Image (spheres, grey):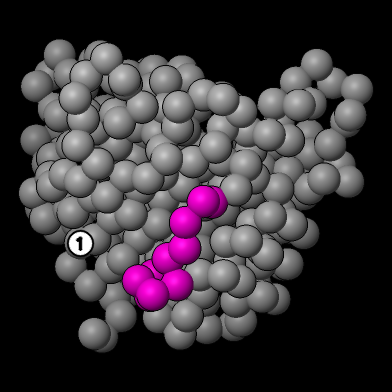
Amino acid sequence: MILRCLGSGSSGNCYLLLAETETLVLDCGLPIREIKKGLDWDISKVVGVLCTHAHLDHAKSVKDFENMGIPVFKPYDETIACPLKIRYGSFGVQAFKVPHDGVPCYGFYITVGGHRILYATDFEYLPCSFKNIRLTDMIVECNHQKELVDKGQAKYAHQIKGHCSLDTLIEKVIKENTTSYLRTVILCHLSQDSADPEECLAEVQNVVGEGVNVVVARKGLEVELSKYPF
């Protein structure tokens, strides 16, 4: 299983979970041409798209995928009847609501093969525990370090109430949900102005230990998600 990052941050978020014959798209906040390029111009393997919320840096290409006949899971859309559990090919998906400064937003728990994956971004905190699920992989927001946030900026309240800080990630996500099954942590949606990638990586690595691969998401990143021998 490969995780390919096409974009991470306010300029656009999109990740691909690449299995041998199937691909699941996590958010589609980039122009469809860029996503197609990231798919090596082959959309035939795409079994579905998961979209966390309606902000364009996550949902820019929703209509493009729908127009191509590819199903998009968007539980945030309250105008449609949307189940919280769904299956796209080999991927089982469970959605759960997260706080994002009053905007409807969802995280996803994904199962495929030997992987149990948490994908959560644009949240102030996680309202549920995954300790008993024994996650193998986390793709989680690490938006800012509180001491680096400019309190005078116009979007200060939104950043604090709508995005996860390094402290919250470590104390309320990493520590509360890490077990010996965890193999990969991918830190996503880092703020260019209020997060130091090297410091965030080092602090999370220190908590999870050397046996876990911790990386910071960036355009062009590819990470192999190691299969745990269940």
Q: Under tag 1, what secondary structure?
A: strand
Q: Residue 61, percent across and down?
A: 32, 19
Picture quarter containing residue 62?
Answer: top left
Residue drawn at point x = 61 percent, y = 81 percent:
209
| Residue 15 location (% of width, % of height) | 38, 42
Residue 215 shows in the view: no
Say if 1 sits above or below 68 in the image: below
Position of 105 with respect to 66 (left or right) is right
Q: Residue at x 19, y 37 (%)?
A: 83
Compare residues 61 and 33 and report the one nearer the observer.
61
Residue in the foreground of this view, choosing between 175 and 189: 175
Left or right of 199: which side holds 41?
A: left
Q: Is residue 65 magenta?
A: no
Q: Is residue 117 left or right of residue 73?
A: right
Query: What type is the residue that disc 1 sits on?
Result: Val
Quadrant showing the N terminus: bottom left
Q: Is residue 127 visible?
A: yes
* Rendered location of residue 132, percent (x, y): 39, 75
Give the prevailing secondary structure in the magenta stretch: loop
Q: Position of residue 38 (x, y in %)?
A: 32, 35
Residue designated by label 1? 112
The number of numbered badges drawn on the structure is: 1
Q: Quadrant of residue 133?
A: bottom left
The image quadrant where one finds the C terminus is bottom left
Q: Residue at x 60, y 48 (%)?
A: 125
Instruction: Classify 10 Å Cα crowding around label 1: few (below 14), some (14-19), many (20 and above).
Output: some
* Residue at the spot 73% in from the left edge and 43% down from the top edge: 144
> As displayed, is residue 79 above or below residue 21?
above
Q: Which residues are magenta?
A: 126-136
The correct choice, above or below, for 76 with respect to 160 in the image is above
The residue closer to the viewer here, 90 or 37, is 90
